[in-house]
Amino acid sequence: MAEGPKPPNRGRLWMIVLATSPIGLFTAWAFWAQIESGGGMGWVGWLIILMLGIISYSISFYFGHRFFEGTLDQYIVSDTFKKKHDWIDLETETRESGDTKIDGWVAHYKFIRTMFAMGLLPLIACIYLFFFA
């Protein structure tokens, strides 16, 4: 007899959020120190700092979920890359769980996966440029 879907452990998911948020904040602070030490870049620098903080949070949440929880993957149906106009877009199809709290976590995880997919290579490039070049 097949078992039903395993419900996510919300306490563990909140612990992953609490553990990975300082990673995003530290990354934003590290890039802020690098950008502002060179005289600053205005609003573009602040936008870069914000996006790098979100991307590093997404990467750490994604791997934290993969290592310690792993239950939200069962709600992901498919990932497809499609060309829209001049852009390549990642579309993730999910299934409904029937519980609004679980669906909220699935939406958060969907956003995290998208930021992880779009942000990994630029983050590595920025780390190289800011710290090693």
Image: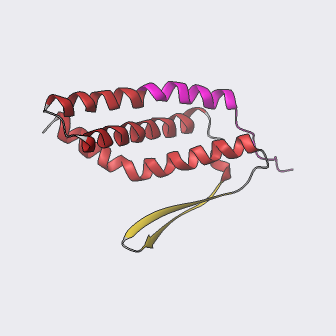
Image point (40%, 42%), residue name: 55
Please check the rendered image and state whether residue 119 is part of the magenta-colored stretch, yes or no.
no
Does 102 sit left or right of 120 as displayed? right
Instruction: Name the one closer to the observer, 133 or 46.
Output: 46
Q: Is 22 or 5 nearer to us in this picture?
A: 22
x and y percentages locating residue 80 in the rendered image: 52, 65
Relative height, residue 92 to residue 110 (above, below) = below
Highlighted range, magenta: 1-22
Measured from the top left, where is residue 82 in percent x and y? Answer: 47, 70
**Res 88 → quadrant:** bottom left
Q: Quarter-wise, where is residue 104 in the image?
A: top right
Q: Is residue 14 above or below residue 71?
A: above
The residue depicted at 56 percent of the width and 37 percent of the height is 65
- Total marks placed: 0
Which residue is rendered at x = 34% and y = 40% of the image?
A: 52
- State whether residue 86 is above or below residue 93: below
- Left or right: 48 in relation to 13: left
- In this view, the residue farthest toward the front is 42
Q: Is residue 42 left or right of residue 60?
A: left
- In the rendered image, residue 105, in percent from the top left (x then y), is placed at 64, 41
**Where residue 3 appears, x then y in whole percent?**
82, 46
Instruction: Give the residue drawn at x 73%, y 54%.
Output: 96
Q: Is residue 11 magenta?
A: yes
Colour mapping: secondary structure
- Quadrant in which the C terminus appears: top left
- In the rendered image, the residue lying farthest to the right is 1
